[in-house]
Image (cartoon, rainbow, N blue to C red):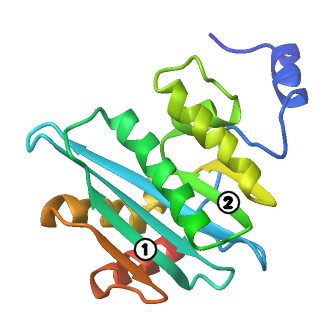
Amino acid sequence: MAKNSFEEFNDAATLDLFHPRTSHTHCWSPPPPGVFKINVDGSSSDIEESSSIGVIIRDCKGQIVAAFCKPLQSHYTAELVEVFALEQGIRLAQESQLSRVIFESDALTVINAVNDSAFGAPHGHIIQDISHAQTSFSFCSFRHLNRDFNLAAHELAQFARRNRSVHLWKGVTPSFLVPFVQADMLH
C-alpha cells in the first residue's frame, strides 16, 4: 500500500542522521581521516553445515589495517553468524586500539537491532554486549552496506569456510583478497 504524503513527511522527519537505518552507498567509501572502517560478514552453508566470519579494517586511504577470518565451531543461522561477525569486528578494533570507528555490515536486521538497542530481539544478549562496547570508542557508528559493496569481508568469510582455519593479517593484504578490495572501491 502506498504511503500518503503525511506518512512520507513523518518518516523523513524522524530520521536519525547519526544512526541511519539504511545506507544508500553506491560503493565502499573510505572513512574520514582519523576514523577506521570495519566491514564484517558472516557465511552460513546449510549444505556444508558450516559457518564462518570475515572482518576487514581499513583506514581513510582504503589501506588494510587488519583482516581476520575464522570458521565457527558449528552451523548457525545466517542472522546469528552476522551477529558473531559484528562482535568479532568490535573485538579486533578494540585489540587494535582504534578509538574512532565505523562498522558496516550487509545484515540490515542486525544493524537495526544494534542501533535500536533491541535487546529483546533474537540474540539480544549479544546485541546488548555490542551496544555496550560502543563506550570503548570515542566515536562509533553502525551502518548498513549493500552486499554488493561488502565483497572483501564476504570473501574473508568464504576463505575461512573453505580452509577451515583462523587467519589474521595486520598491515598487509592477503593476495587472494586484492581483487575483492579493489572491487569494493570500484563499484
Residue ID for mark 1: 67
Residue shown at the point (76%, 43%) measured from the top left: 19
Name the quadrant of the N terminus.
top right
Q: Nearer the viewer, residue 1 or 137?
A: 137
Q: Could you tell me residue 15's position as x and y percent? A: 83, 33
The residues bearing labels 2 and 1 have C-alpha atoms spaced at a distance of 15 Å
* Left or right: residue 20 compared with residue 158: right
Q: Could you tell me residue 177's position as x and y percent? A: 34, 79
- The kind of residue on which mark 2 rests is Ile
* Left or right: residue 103 compared with residue 152: right
Residue shown at the point (47%, 57%) measured from the top left: 40
Q: Nearer the viewer, residue 87 or 34?
A: 87
Quarter of the figure with residue 20: top right
Quarter of the figure with residue 119: top right
Q: Residues within 10 Å of mark 1 (few under 14, many from 20)?
A: many
Q: Could you tell me residue 79's position as x and y percent? A: 39, 34
- The kind of residue on which mark 1 rests is Ala
Give the numbered dot on residue 48. none
Q: Is residue 23 visible?
A: no
Does residue 47 lie above or below 11 as drawn?
below
* Left or right: residue 129 compared with residue 106: right
Q: Residues within 10 Å of mark 2 (few under 14, many from 20)?
A: some
SS state under label 1? strand
